[in-house]
Image: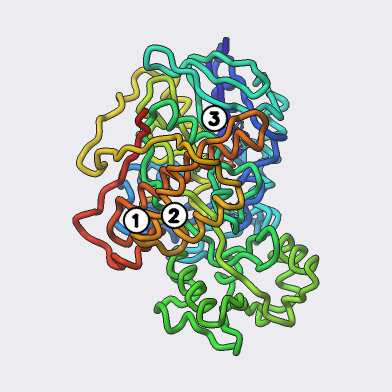
Amino acid sequence: MTHILVIGSGVAGLTAALDADSRPGVEVTLVTKATLDQSNTWYAQGGVAVVTSADDTVASHVADTLVAGAGLSDDEAVEVLCAEGPEAVQHLIDRGVLFDVHDGQLARGLEAAHSHERILHAGGDATGAAIAAALIARLRDSDVVIRENTMVVDLVVEGGRVTGATLLDGGSIEADAVVLATGGAGQLYPYTTNPAVATGDGLAMALRAGAVASDLEFYQFHPTSLAVPGNPLVSEAVRGEGAVLVDRDGRRFMLDVHPDAELAPRDVVARGIAAQMARQGGEPVRLDATGLGAAFLAERFPTIDATVRAHGMDWGREPIPVTPAAHYFMGGVRTDLWARTSLPGLFAVGEVACNGLHGANRLASNSLLEGAVYGRRVVDAVLDPEVAPLEPFDADWAEPVTTTIDGEGPSLSRADLQQLMWDAAGLTRDARGLEDALAELGRSAVRDATDVKSVEDANLRVVAQAVVQSALARRESRGGHFRTDFPQPDPGRAVHSGVVVTR
Ligand SMILES: Cc1cc2nc3c(=O)[nH]c(=O)nc-3n(C[C@H](O)[C@H](O)[C@H](O)COP(=O)(O)OP(=O)(O)OC[C@H]3O[C@@H](n4cnc5c(N)ncnc54)[C@H](O)[C@@H]3O)c2cc1C
C-alpha cells in the first residue's frame, strides 16, 4: 500500500513525487517504464517560459498563451500557469536546476509568439536534460520508492474509484491516489520529435478505465525537425535568434504566408512548410542559420550543433533540410485546475493531462512550466481536502462523444498505424480521410498485451481511434487542427471537446 502512486519520470511526475515526499508521513512510489531519464522532458531544448524580469508581466504571458490557444484556452488554467510559474521555477532552482546566466541575471531568450524575452534555458539548448537530471538526483536522495523499467498496463477501478495499477510483470500496486504523468503520444506518427516511450499509455489506460479525455484532435506538429531518421528537433529558438526558412531556390517563402513569417504560430509555420514541400515534390525546405555564424551556433545551441554535425552538415555555412514532425499533444485526460480527472482517485499532470490551458495550440516552452506548476498543485489536491470539488462539465466543455475500443479484423502494425495517422489525422485532415481511417481502425483488433511493445501498440491503437473520432467531430479549423473541408474557425465551436469509451 502506498499513499500516492506516480506513473512517469518527466518533469510533471518528478515534481509531484518530490513535493509529495516533502509532506510528513506521505509514502510515495514512482514507477517508470524505462530508466528515469527516458522522457520527453529529457529531450526538451528551448527552455521554460516564465516571467522573471521587471519589463515583463504575468498578464503579457497570459495574453500570449491565449492568442496561441486560438480561442480555446481555459482562462483560469492559463492564469494559474503564468501566475504560479515564477514560484515553480524558483522551486526548480532550489532543487538544483542551473539555468543559464548572463551578466549575473537569468539569461532570457525569445521564442515564436512570445511578446517578451522570457525563455529560461540551461546548458544552452539542453534545458530538459538539466531539469530532469537535477530532479532525478533529488529523487534518488529522497524516500520515494523508485521502480524503473516497470511498465504500468492498466488502472484498477473498484466501485468507480481508481485504487491502483497493474504492471506488465504481473504485479500490481495499490494506492490512495494514482497520478498519471505519462507524457505524450508522438509515436502515433511516423515523424516525431518524441522519444520511443511517448506512446500514449496513460491516456489509453484512463480511457479504458472510463475517464473523460478532451481536445484529442489538437496535436502540435513542430515545424522544424532535421530531415533525417529520428527527426531530431531544431528548436524554435534558432528561428528566434534570426534563422530563416527558404525553399530550394533560397527564397524566404514564409513571408508570403504570415506577417510574422518564421515566427508565426507553430501550426501556421508547419503547414507553410508542408505546403512548400508539396510544391517542391516532397523535398524538405531549408533552414538558413548561416547569418548567425558557426561560433554562435555552437555556443548557443550545442546539442543541435552536435546533431547537425553528426549528420555531416555544417549549418554555419549551408542551410539544413527540415520537415515538420509530431511534437506535442494538447489534448489528454480531462482534468480540473487541481489535476483531478473525472474518476475519483485518478489525477493527471503534464502532457498526458488536458486542463484546457493550451487550448487548440500550445505556446512554445509552456509545457515544462506546466509540469512544474501542476506537478505541485496535484499534491495539494491529493492531500488537502479544502481544495474545491471537481466541477461537472460547464459551458466551455462539450458533452463527450463516445468511442469503442476493439475491432474484429487483423491488428495494424505500428508502422501502418503511424502512416494511417500521418495521412488522415496529421497536419491537414478532411472528413473522407478521417472516416476511412476510423473505419480501418474500428476493424482492427487491439493486440494482446504480452510485452512492452505490444502493450504500447494496444495503447496507440486506442488513442488513435479516439484522436480520429475527435478530429472528425470538430468540423472547423482551429490551432493544431486543420480541416481542409472546414478551413475556417467557427465561433460557435469554441468549446473543448470530450471523448469517452463505451463498452
Ligand atoms: C525534442 C523535444 C523538445 C521539447 N522542447 C521543449 C521546450 O523547450 N520547452 C517546453 O516547455 N517543452 C518542450 N517540449 C515538450 C516537453 O518536453 C514535454 O511536454 C514535457 O516534458 C512533458 O513532461 P511530462 O512530465 O508530462 O512527460 P514526459 O517527460 O514525457 O514523461 C513521461 C514519463 O512517463 C513514463 N511512462 C509512460 N508510459 C508509462 C507506462 N505505461 N508505465 C510507466 N511509465 C510510463 C515515461 O517513460 C516517462 O518517464 C519538447 C519536447 C520534445 C520531444
Label 2 element class: loop
Q: Quadrant of ligand 1?
A: top right
> Does residue 286 appear to the left or right of 254 in the view shown?
right
- Closer mark to the observer between disc 1 and disc 2: 2
Tell me the colour scheme of the image: rainbow
User: Is the C-beta of the residue carrying label 3 under 8 Å from the nearest atom of ligand 1?
Assistant: no
Can you give x and y, in whole percent of width and height, for residue 286 in the image? Answer: 62, 78
Q: Which residue is mark 3?
A: 16
Identify whether 157 is placed above or below 483: above
Label 1 element class: helix
Q: Amino acid at mark 3?
A: Ala
> Does residue 342 appear to the left or right of 198 in the view shown?
left
Front-most of 109 and 250? 250
User: CB under 8 Å between callouts 1 and 2?
Assistant: no
Residue 71 seen in the current view: yes
The total of numbered circles placed on residues is 3
How far apart in space, not on screen, are marks 2 and 3 (Cα)? 22 Å
